[in-house]
Image (cartoon, rainbow, N blue to C red):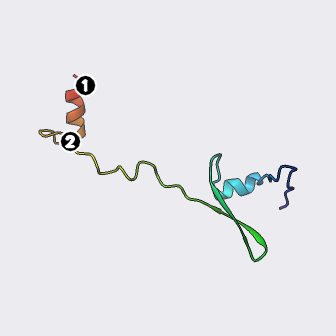
Amino acid sequence: MKTVVSERGQITLPKSVRVSLGLRPGTILEIAVINGQLVGTKNEQTDPFSKWRGKGSLPEGFDSVDAYLAEVRE
């Protein structure tokens, strides 16, 4: 596949490449020159909620989230 560098130094990645690599708008690519070749690596973003999973606790007297939600929604 070929692509052309624009006047502003931009390139367009072909759709087949974007789809096969799972690149979506906002995906961060790390670009490097290695042995005279341009190498792009997708920077995997972590789940923003992963650091919070398991940090919460239910108030005393509730044994499930459903029971707590039923109480606070009354």
Residue 15 lies left or right of residue 3; in this view the side is left
Residue sticking out furthest to the top? 74
In-image side of 21 versus 59 (left or right): right
Q: Is residue 56 left or right of residue 39?
A: left
Disc 1 crowd, CA 10 A, few/some/many (<14, 14-19, 20+): few
Q: Quadrant of residue 33?
A: bottom right
Disc nearer the start of the sequence (1/2):
2
The amino acid marked with disc number 2 is Leu
Vertical side of 69 occupied by 32: above or below: below
Is 69 located above or below residue 17 in the figure? above
Residue in the image at 22% along x and 29% along y: 70
* SS at mark 2 in the image: loop
Dot 2 surroundings within 10 Å: few (below 14), some, or many (20 or more)? few
Q: Secondary structure at mark 1?
A: loop
- Kindly report the distance in space between the C-alpha atoms of the residues bearing marks 1 and 2: 15 Å
Q: Measuring 83% from the left and 49% from the top, which residue is drawn there?
A: 8
Q: Amino acid at mark 1?
A: Arg
What label sits on residue 21 in the rendered view? none
The image quadrant that residue 42 belongs to is bottom right
Location of the N terminus (image quadrant)? bottom right
From the image, tell me which residue sits under label 2: 58
Instruction: Identify residue for label 1.
Output: 73
Image spot of residue 44 (x, y percent): 55, 58
Task: Please state the horizontal and vertical placement of residue 4, each as a whole percent of the image.
Answer: 87, 56
Extreme-front residue of the structure: 8
Most foreground residue, 47 or 36:
36
Q: Residue at x 38, y 53 (%)?
A: 51
Frontmost residue, 27 versus 2 = 27
Question: Where is residue 71 drawn, in percent x and y?
Answer: 19, 28
Q: Quadrant of the C terminus?
A: top left
